[in-house]
Amino acid sequence: MQDKVILFDGTSLDGFYEFDDDRPDVTGNPSNWYLADGAMTVNRYNIASEYEYGDAHVHVEFNLPDMPEKTGQGKANSGLFIHGCYEIQILDSYGKESPADDDCGAIYKIAPPLVNACKAPGEWQSFDVFVRAAKIREDGSVAKHAVMTVFLNGQLIHNNVELPRHCACGRYERIVERGPVLLQDHFCPVSFRNIWVRPLD
């Protein structure tokens, strides 16, 4: 098994760059997210890792702000994009019964989590994502869709889910065989730490 590749260890934002669909003038700039106490916190613009991967185990830890005045998609919203094109929703869905396909842990608008494994805001949480990358033919068509298994806080929330399409607002508006870790700016001060990828191909 290959060694894991550390993308963020709490000491530097090197290795991440800004990405914004509507701002080509900022895309590619070094990340301007806040760095303090071993974590980085959302500032303006999405960020993507320079490192790209195919089949992999991706580990990301996150901490949600308590935003009791907000509801729905405005409540501690962010996202983890695998390969820069499949979004695993980050949201304050603590205590919600029957989570939907836009709640925390959902593969956004593709599959709801099997269970609500969310912790309360202010507690560190973790995603462990195992992805088998899509296979693309020479003509650009998809020969095989990506498949994803996801654990939230150690609980299985997706089991070998096939991903028939990319999600909106990612790094790529198409299915790819390799891509970065992308973290979303959705105007909420979500924090992240301990981000790494273990290649499996």
Image (tube, rainbow, N blue to C red):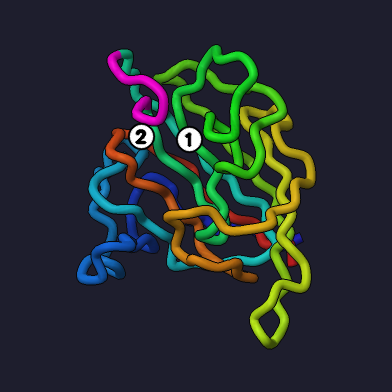
Give the CA separation, mark 1 to mark 2. Answer: 9 Å
Q: Residue furthest bottom?
A: 138
**In this rendering, would 94 be left or right of 10?**
right
Q: Residue beneath label 2, please?
A: 190
Which residue type does callout 2 highlight?
Val
Q: Residues within 10 Å of mark 2 (few under 14, many from 20)?
A: many
Is the Cβ of the residue at disc 1 closer than 8 Å to that at disc 2?
A: yes
The magenta stretch is 69-75
**In this rendering, would 104 be left or right of 17?**
right
Residue 124, above or below 175: above
Helix, strand or loop at mark 2: loop
Q: Is residue 45 magenta?
A: no
Which residue type does callout 1 highlight?
Ile
Identify the residue at horizontal 23%, vertical 53% (top origin): 32
Dividing the picture into quadrants, the one containing residue 197 is bottom right
Q: Residue beneath label 1, please?
A: 90
